[in-house]
Amino acid sequence: MVKILLLLVIVAGACKKDKPDAVFPIELTGYWLENVRFDGSVISYKEIHFWGDSVKFTSVDVATYQFTSARGTYSTQGDKLITNFKEVTVHRGGNIISRGPVSGSYLENATYTLNAINLTLNYTTYPAVAPMNTTIVFNRFLGD
């Protein structure tokens, strides 16, 4: 009986174990790209990067190769994303064409939901007519 139990322990221990799935931290820190299909039909997209207490929110106009980036700080309270953008920079074709303090707001009244690979931001934008609720889904960028 002891030999049979010992044999079962040895056989069970020698069985190949499945590799665990990769685990991604559920945190804002990182680089996020708007969930769009880059198939030639995209005319603009957004990206957001969180590190330390800093944030950079960028809008990219694909047709003109223009990047508008707002930089500042952020904090969270529950599902609220509180941003304080201080500087906006506009790049076109690799050259800075303007830089200055932020006028207006970015990500106003923002809330978020987060999982390991998606970040959903809900915030207020101000098109010409009236304030509008806006939602953007970002994918976590996993670089090499």
Image: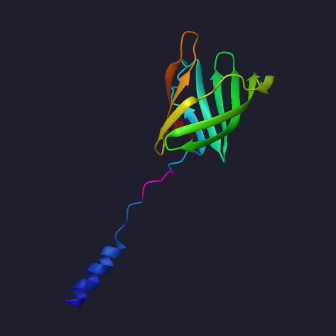
Residue found 23% across the figure and 90% down from its top: 2
Note whether residue 39 is visible: yes
Left or right of 15 in this view: 75: right
Q: Please identify the residue farthest to the top as the structure is shown.
A: 129
Where residue 47 sits, quadrant-wise, is: top right
Asked if the magenta segment contains residue 10, the reply would be: no
In the rendered image, residue 115, in percent from the top left (x then y), is placed at 46, 44
Left or right of 2 in this view: 129: right
Residue found 59% across the figure and 27% down from its top: 46
In the rendered image, residue 65, in percent from the top left (x then y), is placed at 69, 20
Check the image and report above or below for 116 versus 64.
below
In the rendered image, residue 100, in percent from the top left (x then y), is placed at 79, 25
Check the image and report above or below for 74 versus 107.
below
Is the N terminus in the top left, top right, bottom left or bottom right quadrant? Answer: bottom left
Q: From which residue to which does the magenta span run?
A: 20-25
Where residue 30 sits, quadrant-wise, is: top right
| Magenta segment main secondary structure | loop
Total marks drawn?
0
Note whether residue 142 is visible: no
In the rendered image, residue 22, in percent from the top left (x then y), is placed at 47, 53
Report the coloring of the rendering: rainbow
Check the image and report above or below for 24 versus 122.
below
Looking at the picture, tell me which residue is in the foreground, 128 or 140: 128
Residue found 53% across the figure and 28% down from its top: 123
